[in-house]
């Protein structure tokens, strides 16, 4: 009997899963892409795919055990150890899968894989394709394979298909007593409403960077999958953990515009350093690994350093890659990072001759729809893979270049489960509990026993932080981004989160995006609905976790927290310095004059 799998999303998890499922003769696969097939976070990924390859290909001394240890350390121990073990041990299998579908990874002169080093990895284990164009190369190769299969009639593809609802039968999603089973999707295509029945639905919709004012995510990243799953009764988890990439090109914000240009982790892996406006290299003051500390540490250190200097929170710091060019030879940056070189040149910068102004930007959501090790959510018939899922791999903070790998491994495992399940289903995660507001918290948090007014509604910034500007009083996406960046961004505290929660609730009461008619043909209305719901869930979770851990930093907390237990704080306070020290450089290249404080347009 033929069984239909509907895959929603066209990033690495969705494309790879659709291809694998289409190889089974008894399956019918339909892939629904919100925009063009290539429009996803995957396409913009520069860093690469982490994997410990077979002996002879892996870096000397590297091991799967080391990859596991690095992943657990970056996640602050809040990872699911078994999920991490699966990710790291099965990586080589799915690297082979990518190669089978036409992805060619970069090689050294001797023909061996060219492995890169990135932050918080203990060895070089990052595979790249086209230098810093890894995501684009993967998206194009998998997309071409998908279209080839579609021409052969082995799967069906619809682009411009925006899913508005998961169709369900039975159960009571409102109470969570017995989850309904997902039986298909309702979606918009060509301005018309459509419905599609399915034996199972795989959500691979990516993240929600458009919650924030600055993001590396494209315009399609509007929390659609999370919102769809939550409304169908699925459990969510770890939503307080949102990663901000520390180095995106500082440029004028354009609401709804193109994503912030990400300057890959690999640039710091090659030796680039971060300077403040006085030319001082500050990261060694904050972490022994300096620029190669985990992303949450680097982003937080930037924020704390700006606060210590009395500068606005959105001020840039400077990424200096000139030492790389000096030590590796003229033209190295252009060869190793062709996409970044071209993009920065187009923005008016020559990074071989001057530092680049950079700022943190919303990049990746560690939390998401709770799944088991086979991608199953708590709702029968519903799978999730990739960034939309919370598999337990990432914990409180994602290790660089583990995201593409997670989409591959758990997208494949979801397909394997679908092909072998024949309708069986085990509940993947506990039901999400409800808070005082009526919204469910993350599974990792306890139910709230106080109202949001208990901490007041004052929005005092963390000590020393200079606010970037007022928050508009009425709902729009620009207002949402400013609110979330100021009150639920890199640095958080109880007062700011309380005000954010109250503001979001007020917007929901006026705009009421949560009751947009399911039959609405306005895609932007549905996206607003999804973004506002996701924002409320994130803020609720951030308020519930009163300590700091991983990417969740509470400036009003004395200790870090790990599921309620006190642990060693993950980050020290900004060091006190009355005057900037003399510039220092990790690679001892020549001292430089103060970087130009220029922002590209």
Image (tube, rainbow, N blue to C red):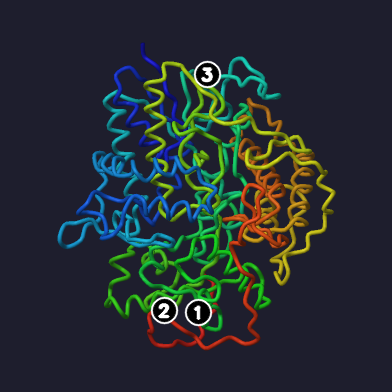
Mark 1 residue element: loop
Picture coordinates of residue 111 (x, y %)? 16, 57
How packed mark 3 is, by other alpha carbons closer than 10 Å (few <14, some 14-19, many 20 or more), is: some
Mark 2 residue element: loop
Q: Which residue is mark 1?
A: 281
Q: Which residue is mark 3?
A: 183
Mark 3 residue element: strand
Q: Residue furthest top?
A: 1
Q: CA distance from mark 3 to mark 1?
A: 55 Å
Marks 3 and 2: in contact by CB < 8 Å? no
Residue 398 in the image: above or below residue 202: below
Marks 2 and 1: in contact by CB < 8 Å? yes
| Residue in the image at 34% along x and 75% along y | 324
Picture coordinates of residue 149 (x, y %)? 29, 29
Relative placement, left or right, of 434 versus 9 is: right
| Residue in the image at 36% along x and 65% along y | 342
Q: Residue furthest left?
A: 110
Q: Earlier in the sequence, mark 2 or mark 3?
A: 3
User: Which numbered circle lies on residue 33?
Assistant: none
Q: Which residue is mark 2?
A: 586
Q: Earlier in the sequence, mark 1 or mark 2?
A: 1
Residue 350 in the image: above or below residue 375: below
Relative placement, left or right, of 355 versus 308 is: left
Q: Observer-nearest residue: 557 or 201? A: 557
Q: Observer-nearest residue: 35 or 121? A: 121
| Residue in the image at 50% along x and 74% along y | 318
How packed mark 2 is, by other alpha carbons closer than 10 Å (few <14, some 14-19, many 20 or more), is: some
Relative placement, left or right, of 454 versus 150 is: right
């Amino acid at each position: 009997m033929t069984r239909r799998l509907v895959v929603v999303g066209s990033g690495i998890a969705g494309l790879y899963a659709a291809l694998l499922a289409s190889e089974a003769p008894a399956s019918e696969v339909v892939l629904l892409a919100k925009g063009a097939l290539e429009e996803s976070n995957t396409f913009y990924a520069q860093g690469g795919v982490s994997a410990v390859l077979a002996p002879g290909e892996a870096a000397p001394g590297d091991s799967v055990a080391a990859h596991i240890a690095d992943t657990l350390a970056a996640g602050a121990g809040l990872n699911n150890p078994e999920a991490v073990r699966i990710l790291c041990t099965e990586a080589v299998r799915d690297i082979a899968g990518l190669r089978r579908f036409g992805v060619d990874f970069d090689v050294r002169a001797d023909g061996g894989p060219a492995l890169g080093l990135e932050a918080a990895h203990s060895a070089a284990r990052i595979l790249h394709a086209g230098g810093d164009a890894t995501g684009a190369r993967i998206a194009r190769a998998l997309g071409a394979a998908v279209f080839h299969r579609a021409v052969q009639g082995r799967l069906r593809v619809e682009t411009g298909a925006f899913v508005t609802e998961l169709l369900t039968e039975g159960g009571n999603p409102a109470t969570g007593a017995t989850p309904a089973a997902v039986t298909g999707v309702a979606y918009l295509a060509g301005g018309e409403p459509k419905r599609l029945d399915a034996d199972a639905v795989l959500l691979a919709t990516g993240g929600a960077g458009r919650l924030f004012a600055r993001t590396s995510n494209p315009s399609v990243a509007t929390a659609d999958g999370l919102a769809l799953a939550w409304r169908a009764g699925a459990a969510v988890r770890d939503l307080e953990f949102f990663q901000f990439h520390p180095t995106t090109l500082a440029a004028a914000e354009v609401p709804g515009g193109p994503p912030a240009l990400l300057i890959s982790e690999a640039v710091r892996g090659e030796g680039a350093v971060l300077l403040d406006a006085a030319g001082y290299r500050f990261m060694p003051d904050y972490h022994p690994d300096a620029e190669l500390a985990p992303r949450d540490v680097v982003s937080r250190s930037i924020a704390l350093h700006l606060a210590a200097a009395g500068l606005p929170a959105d001020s840039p710091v400077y990424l200096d890659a000139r030492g790389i060019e000096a030590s590796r030879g003229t033209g190295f940056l252009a060869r190793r990072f062709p996409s970044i070189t071209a993009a920065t040149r187009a923005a008016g910068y020559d990074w071989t001759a001057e530092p680049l102004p950079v700022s943190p930007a919303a990049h990746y959501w560690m939390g998401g729809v709770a799944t088991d090790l086979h991608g199953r959510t708590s709702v029968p018939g519903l799978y999730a893979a990739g960034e939309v899922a919370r598999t337990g791999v990432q914990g409180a903070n994602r290790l660089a270049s583990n995201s593409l790998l997670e989409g591959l491994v758990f997208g494949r495992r979801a397909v394997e489960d679908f092909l072998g399940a024949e309708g069986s289903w085990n509940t993947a995660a506990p039901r999400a509990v409800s808070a005082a507001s009526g919204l469910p918290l993350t599974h990792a948090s306890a139910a709230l026993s106080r109202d949001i007014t208990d901490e007041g509604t004052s929005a005092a910034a963390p000590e020393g932080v200079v606010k970037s500007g007022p928050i508009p009083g009425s709902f729009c996406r620009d207002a949402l981004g400013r609110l979330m960046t100021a009150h639920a961004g890199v640095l958080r505290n109880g007062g700011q989160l309380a005000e954010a929660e109250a503001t979001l609730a007020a917007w929901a009461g006026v705009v009421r995006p949560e009751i947009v008619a399911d039959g609405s043909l306005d895609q932007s209305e549905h996206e607003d609905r999804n973004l506002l719901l996701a924002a409320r869930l994130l803020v609720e979770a951030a308020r519930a976790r009163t300590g700091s851990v991983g990417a969740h930093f509470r400036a009003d907390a004395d200790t870090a927290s790990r599921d309620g237990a006190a642990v060693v704080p993950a980050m020290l306070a900004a060091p006190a310095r009355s005057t900037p020290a003399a510039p220092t450089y990790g690679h001892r290249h020549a001292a430089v004059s103060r970087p130009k404080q220029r922002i590209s347009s």
